[in-house]
Image (cartoon, rainbow, N blue to C red):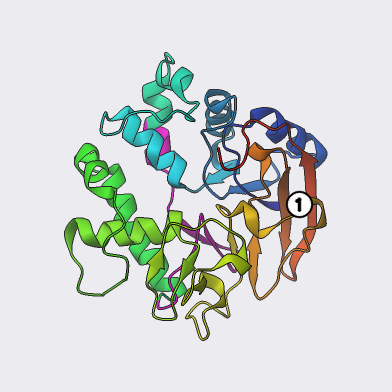
Amino acid sequence: MSLYCIGDLQGCSAPFHRLLEKIDFSPSRDTLYLLGDLVNRGPDSLGTLRSLMELGDAAQCLLGNHDLHLLALWQGVRKPGRHDTVNDLLQAPDREGLLDWLRHRAMAMHRHGWLMVHAGVLPQWSTAQTLMLAAEVESALRGPDLKGFLTAMYGNTPCQWQGGLEGADRLRVIVNALTRLRFCTAQGKMEFSSSEGAHGAPVGYMPWFEVPGRATQDTPIAFGHWSTLVTDARQHTGLRNNVLPLDTGCVWGGCLTAARLGAAGVLELIQVPCEQAQKPGK
């Protein structure tokens, strides 16, 4: 049995299937952990979701910001952007089943000693608190007022966690941390305008995983979302400072990366090159 963590697919179905072939994946034997942004910007979001759904429990998936955006499009609370590539999915005859399946995916997971999130974890949050807060969002996504939740989900404020937050503000901070976070202050104030690499932090901010004394520093964390952290996907060095970034820019023409996990950490990194579906910054 092998356990694999895979970064952002973003609708790049062909590289995904090449990667499964390369690792000799068997759904009866192995388990995949997908770190969110399963869809959008790549050429085949429909095929990607169908493949993941068909894998059943062998593919454990997180939700990323693009996946939440797709749900918002489905519910009519957002309009498509010019770089969105999910229209075929939204018009598909099996759309309702696929998107109902998607809304039931996780916001965070703790598996085999690893904390898995799409984007990041605020410095005050322990592993246990992260999972409890993720469960609050999961409950809203699976509840009777999905449209209301998605309508209130968007926005950059509040930009800092406080335990007394309630309602839409509370859920919005949780969503933003788990699916959008890159930089924050030592006090956990989030910043959303920059998507540069780790050395491009705005003044007063730092990568979330570099905050001194963050509550999850002793827990290995696998995450995606931040493709500019790994400037050359082919030279990915694996786990550093107890974090494992796995968005290696597949949709931008980089690589799709699977990390084989074991008790000793990352046992192996396996990659396949990807066709460029969109240009960075466009």
Q: Is 11 located above or below residue 36 in the figure?
A: above
Residue 110 colored in magenta in the image: yes
Q: Which of 52 and 189 is in front in this view?
A: 189
Image location of residue 179, percent across then percent down: 44, 54
Q: Nearer the viewer, residue 150 or 48?
A: 150
Q: Nearer the viewer, residue 142 or 253?
A: 253
Residue 27 colored in magenta in the image: no
Res. 263 image quadrant: bottom right
Q: Is 153 located above or below residue 166 in the figure?
A: above
Residue ranking furthest to the bottom: 213
How many numbered badges does the structure rendering display?
Answer: 1
Q: Which of 20 and 28 is in front in this view?
A: 20
Res. 260 image quadrant: bottom right
Q: Is 9 located above or below residue 260 in the figure?
A: above
Image location of residue 72, percent across then percent down: 32, 35
Residue appearing at x 63%, y 32% in the figure: 12
Q: Is residue 50 left or right of residue 98?
A: right
Tag 1, which secondary structure? helix
Quadrant including the C terminus: top right
Residue appearing at x 26%, y 64% in the figure: 158
Image location of residue 109, percent across then percent down: 49, 58
Q: Bounds of the magenta span? A: 100-124
The residue where tag 1 is placed is 233
Amino acid found under the numbered disc labelled 1: Ala
Q: Residues within 10 Å of mark 1 (few under 14, many from 20)?
A: many
Image location of residue 48, percent across then percent down: 58, 29
